[in-house]
Amino acid sequence: MSIDLGLPDLGGLAEVPTTDEPQKAKDYKSDQEVRWCPGCGDYIVLNTMQSFLPTLGLKPENIVFVSGIGCSSRFPYYMDTYGMHSIHGRAPAIATGLATSRPDLSVWVITGDGDALSIGGNHLIHALRRNVNFKILLFNNRIYGLTKGQYSPTSEEGKRTKSTPMGSLDHPFNPLSLALGAEASFVARALDSDKKGLTEVLTAAAQHRGSAFVEIYQNCPIFNDGAFDVLKDKDEAARRIIPLRPGEPITFGPESEYGVVRSGFAGLETAKVFEIGLDNVVVHDSTVADPAYAFALSRIGGQDLEHTPTGIFRQVARTTYDDAARAQVAQASEAKPADLQALLRGNDTWTV
Amino acid sequence: MHLAECQQHRQGDRKAETVTGAPVQKRGTAAPMSRETTTSPANATTDVTKLDRVVIRFAGDSGDGMQLTGDRFTSEAAAFGNDLATLPNFPAEIRAPQGTIPGVSSFQVHFADYDILTPGDRPDVLVVMNPAALKSNLPDVPHGGILIVNTDEFSKRNLTKVGYDASPLQDGSLEPYQVYEVGMSSLTQGALEGTGLGKKDAERCKNMFALGLLSWMYHRPTEGTERFLAEKFAAKPAIAEANLLAFRAGWNYGETTEAFANTYEVAPAKLPSGTYRQITGNNALAYGIVAAGQQAKLPVVLGSYPITPASDILHELSKHKNFGVTTIQAEDEIAGIGAALGAAYGGALGVTSTSGPGVALKSETIGLAVMTELPLLVIDVQRGGPSTGLPTKTEQADLLQAMFGRNGESPVPVVAPCSPGDCFDIALEAVRIALTYRTPVMLLSDGAIANGSEPWLVPDVTDLSNLSVEFATEPNAMDGSDEHWPYVRNTDTLAREWAVPGTPGLQHRIGGLEKADNQGQISYDPDNHDRMVRLRQAKIDGIDVPDVTVDDPEGNARILALGWGSSFGPIGAACRRVRKSGMEIAQAHLRHLNPLPANLGRILESYDTVVLPEMNMGQLAMLLRSRYLVDIRSYTKVAGLPFRAAELAEVFTDIINDTRPEGSGEADHVLTEATE
């Protein structure tokens, strides 16, 4: 339940200054040579981000990228904005302090499956439950790249890696289910190779007031090459990807012959449209207050990527931590002047 | 104790703290310590004895409200104008099993008609609410001391619980003391008859009865307590009334019964003139942070995770949002410092508060702050360690952790307050260093300072120094381009510029990877890394810190008592005793531990012997030995409690008289002291 603080219903960028000066993608390229491996999915995400940011029309000096540790966390060095490449897993904590004290900044956290879900799992869930106004882009390549190829918390069970020659034993996280369990107010998924889909999701995330969680399936050509190939092959993609479009029945397949229908207790499953009828196909609504719907969507498909919904799963308005924190400071300042001498004296003094 | 006395030792002979303060006679006879005894007009059978100082300890079960009782008595002493110092001592368990020794909670207050330095070694008066409190505290009471015993709790069952075969009230074992037996529980219940309060609730007010009785015995003003009770229980008028009745019943019991032959007066202390208030170390730290934010004209962001004994800093700061203070209770210690560092990056005064185990978790982020060269205040209220250790007890064993507890060459300035009131000044000093030099600063308080209180000369805010900083606004590239180079340094301070997000044209990236000198790009160049390591070290080594002053009244001392942190009080009191017995000893106290004051080496060399008491295994001694190649006589004790003045006076005296074995003898002595 959200607490009504009487705050105006603002977008995520409401207090971030804008500029009329036209911007281009190259304005957001730093002078640093990009040093990801050839063919890395991170390049595409970087290019998409650099092409997308000019559409926001923000003053570039009011954009900050904060990252943790891992291949994807080198991202801030390549953006000509303010940036901090911090320590493993802690970017959401650092961004919480920054976003809380600076409402005039558009803050982006860049993280990976190891950074966000393993060493930084605690900060991630707490940032999401607090709903601090920053955007979290989780580059999920289902492997540890920077440390050269150990399994990650999103690797499929039984995965053979350098540290698991007989196969990994861990059951993987579903990052979207985890975020929804933490009651994230904005949850989406995109593919690194789908520039259009990714841009749509980034645009909505930027405009969302509160924590926005975006999982980006990203290929690691060195240690986990082809992890998402089934979603990039044209025929396979048509069969497996379930595009989520607001207000439309959730159908997929080459002929839109499949649909998502309700199943059991608050669940969803796929079915053939001709068998169940289009009227029974669920119409997508990301603004449903109960997170159970988006959670059920996140459970469609699995480790094998058999079915993979993409787009915005959930987007609801909820009081943000930073707005509320600033409101308390403002309220206290209004109620009582900042009289330092009076504070130091207190109520109980004596004179010698 | 006076405001930041350790900053500037006042020269000249000071009144020695006397070894005992209580009358040692049986009732009705004259006390050796008293200077004047008159008969009170109010009660013909009660004499008034004037004392220069008294140590009272209230002890009872954790649920008996001893901390509140002690706190109120302290406020009464403060309002009366005494100098005072306090020592709360309580278990880590919120409610240990009732009536057991581990469940005993106590509060000691030392008040005097002159400036005192410690909460007192031993109580002159011990108030005990049950057998467990008696058993665990009696060894501290000198023979002749006063015991005020709540007899109602001395049941067979309660006695057995703590291993008394027979009641000490009856078996003659308390003969060396003056014992006053008072049925506090039943008297309180009797006083509250007719209020409609249940028997159990009525009994809970017995601590106020004890407070009333002691307030009468020591002629304390009562208006403050009456007002406090009315305010504290404003929402529960029946409870407020009950506590008030119990308090008055205790007072009246003393006045109307003839059980007590003496009451005592301790005149107001002659402290430097000004307006005083009572303050604990944690509150003074919180006020210091608020003041630092105001003086720096920066918003304050505290990121913190609750931990004993530092939580009160978070509690206090959360009350002062009207000063532009944001408090974030984070999900863990790491997030607490992360939020503080993120806020510092954005141009706020970032602060995190914790205790030793929390510092262990924050270490990696402190390293990031060292590397990114951002200002940050890290407060460590030290407690007994290692690991969870003794959460509610004091220790000084985090010094080496503060100095070196990070990977790589990671120098951090370290400062430590010497008293509760000094916490205010040291917070401002730590912030000055952090902002001027763009560095995380470790502030080492400890449990004794954090919870202890003393009268505090309220500073005039117009005297506080200006801490304002300038953010970068213009490109600073040394090649004349219009770029911002994040690691260009101020030639005096070696501090880099603080260019906060939102500043047009200064977009840049920082992080934990090594950066190229000046330009600030990622650099793996071997020579550059060597240069940056040395630059970071030189920046910290070059911090401007005041010289340390030496207190040596006669000027001929050959032995120097050196200390840091909360041991200032006991070391100072011990020096007074040594001087009173005709010997000379100099005292110096360090508030800056990294870098050390520039004149320290010269001072250490100028004495035949330097003795350094520490509540650790000799951590500062180790640093000084390696830094100055001088020997240090280390005296160590790690018992969770502050040093006693008498104990240190004995150590100092033995060293002056050369009757103290060098080297290995220290450890033996330490064990004896700790287990006595």
Image: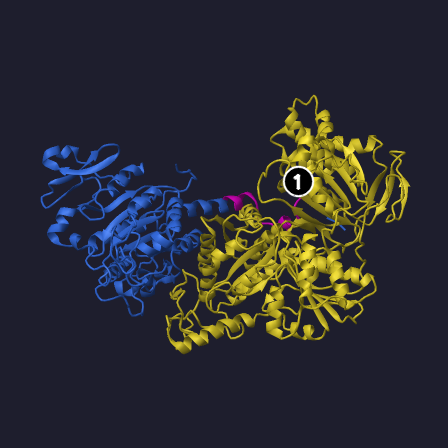
Chain colours: A blue, B yellow
Check the image and report above or below for B246 versus B108. Answer: above
Q: Nearer the viewer, residue B662 or B359?
A: B662
Residue B579 x %, y %: 80, 63
Task: Name the residue nearer the viewer: B329 or A98.
Answer: B329
Residue A170 on image: x %, y %: 30, 50
The residue positioned 54% from the left and 62% from the top of the image is B402
- Specify the quadrant that holds the N terminus of chain B: bottom right
Q: Which residue lies furthest to the front in this view?
A: B165
Q: Which chain carries label 1?
A: B
Q: Residues within 10 Å of mark 1 (few under 14, many from 20)?
A: some
- The residue that label 1 is drawn on is B68
Residue toward you, B34 or A22: B34
Magenta segment's dominant SS is: helix
> Residue at the location (83% across, 40% down)?
B263
Residue B644 image point, x, y percent = 72, 55
Q: Name the residue rendered at 42%, 39% in the picture.
A: A6
Q: Is residue A342 magenta?
A: yes
Q: Does the magenta stretch include residue A337?
A: yes
Q: Could you tell me the amino acid type at mark 1?
A: Leu
- Dot 1 falls on a residue whose secondary structure is helix
Report which quarter residue B658 is drawn in.
Answer: bottom right
Q: Where is residue A320 in the image (x, y as percent from the top left)?
A: 40, 45
**One can see residue B10 in this view:** no
Determine whether, in the image, residue B638 is placed left or right of residue A141.
Answer: right
Residue B13 makes an appearance in the image: yes
What segment carries the magenta color?
A331-348
Q: In this view, does A50 lie to the left or right of B90?
A: left
